[in-house]
Image (cartoon, rainbow, N blue to C red):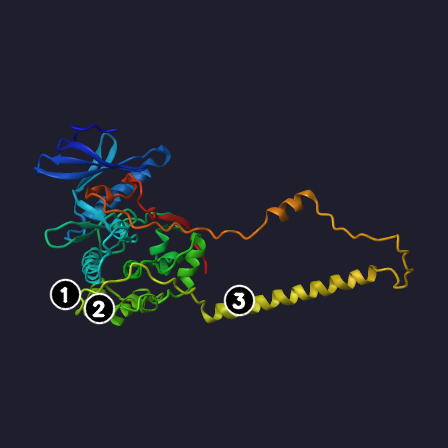
Amino acid sequence: MFDARELVAGRYKLERMLGEGGSASVWQALDHTLERTVAIKFLYAKDERYRNQQVEQFLREARLACAVQHPNVIHTLDFGTARDRAYMVMELLAGEDLAERVMREPKLELNEIVRLLCGVLRGLAAIHEAGIVHRDLKPENIFLLAGDDEVHPKIIDFGIARNVDPKSTRRSVLTSKEGVIVGTPQYMSPEHIRGVPDLDHRTDLWSVGVILYELLTGRLPYEHANSGDLAIMIATTDAPRVSTLVPSVPPALAEVVSRALNRDRHARFQTATEMLRALRDATRDVLEPGAAILLPSTAPPPPAPTLRPQHASRSRWAALAVALLLLASAWLWSTRERSRQPPHETLPLPPSAAVERTTTIPKAASDQVTSSGPTAPSAAAVQPAAQAPAPKSAASTAGGGAKTPASGKAQRRVPVMWRKLDF
């Protein structure tokens, strides 16, 4: 562990801890060489069995981040090891991330949303030009830097990014092992979900489309409590159109979202710059002073995603087969019961010989019958908008694992990993 006032690498004097998590801690420090305040992220490698792999991945993230210098991307200034711990030096940011901003009032206006996403796309274009695919774009990884006139977005956290430029000397291996998919499912593209080997920059454009969809409608295009079912939905169904949820969204803007969320990546926007131009053209009037359009705070529930025709036909045939099987089973059972019946001829019973027919239910079954009842639907945790949090020194958000959750905040969406799925 490090202590305040300690000198790291003979250059950075630690001042105070900004955040701590299970895998990293972030400190505010003074850089004596540049005479500026910076943020330093230290890696915790608790499991010695995987320590070398974790350190390699951490330093790999630092190298990728250093390759990009753009106003809309967090600046990584230095990295190395000190006292047998890997560290990364970044610019110190003050503000909040996009996930925190959307949870409080007032709601973002349409012109604010467009300006924020234009900045994100500019930063993403620089990342892609460096031959890097981010692979985990989400509101938690978009930091909002408070400025004099407007909020300035910055893309942070290159934890699971990959280098896809074959000419780059900084080329490195994937973060995850072969056959294992890593990312945040709600923002992963169909090809990312499927685990295709040639994943490219267009997966990031899908993620931007999901973020834009969420900001416009107040909900995600795909939602399911089970990650496996969510993956199947993303890979096989189309999201409800924005215009059906929020009719006030300009049609041209709704079309931008639909194209960004096209499951065929060849029909999607091919570059961040192309998507940026389409977003500007679709909202040119919205960006004019005084032309802000307020979006509703809530949207009607989206219709259930429609399966593709071949899947729907397959489901109908399966249901018909099950029904026929049940009918055949019932007919066989009734035939067997009739064959066991005694001859139909019977003698009349005297009046005193009343027959009482009872049905005995075993105690365990009785308990089940008694306790059974309509099951309450599982309550999705819908939290009311939180009060505006105090601006924080937020370089700690640059390393997802280094945040200290505050009470009252919405549950963070974190990256998960699962085995490659075959659809």
* Residue in the image at 17% along x and 70% along y: 285
Name which residue lies at 31% across and 58% down. Answer: 218
Q: Secondary structure beneath disc 3?
A: helix
Whole-percent x, y for residue 422 in the image: 45, 58
Tell me, yes or no, whether the two marked residues, 1 and 2, touch with CB atoms within 8 Å: no
Alpha-carbon neighbours of circle 3 within 10 Å: few (<14), some, or many (≥20)?
Answer: few
Numbered label attached to residue 278:
2
Name the foreground residue: 88 vs 16.
16
In this rendering, position of residue 412 left or right of residue 322: left
Mark closer to the observer (1, 3):
1
Q: Quadrant of residue 188?
A: bottom left
Q: Nearer the viewer, residue 180 or 385?
A: 385
Residue 290 - label: 1
Residue 71 at least partly seen: yes
The kind of secondary structure element at disc 2 is: helix
In front of the other: 25 or 394: 394
Give the quarter of the image for residue 260. Answer: bottom left
Whole-percent x, y for residue 25 in the image: 25, 36
- Which residue is the extreme one toward the front? 351
Among the 4 quarters of the image, the one containing residue 24: top left
Task: Give the residue type that dot 2 points to.
Answer: Ala
Disc 1 element: loop
> Going from the N terminus, do you reach mark 1 or mark 2 first?
2
Q: Amino acid at mark 1?
A: Gly
Residue 162 in view here: no
Marks 1/3: CA–CA distance:
51 Å
Q: CA distance from mark 3 to mark 2?
A: 38 Å
Label 1 Cα neighbours within 10 Å, binned few <14 / some 14-19 / many ≥20: few
Chain-order first, disc 3 or disc 2: 2
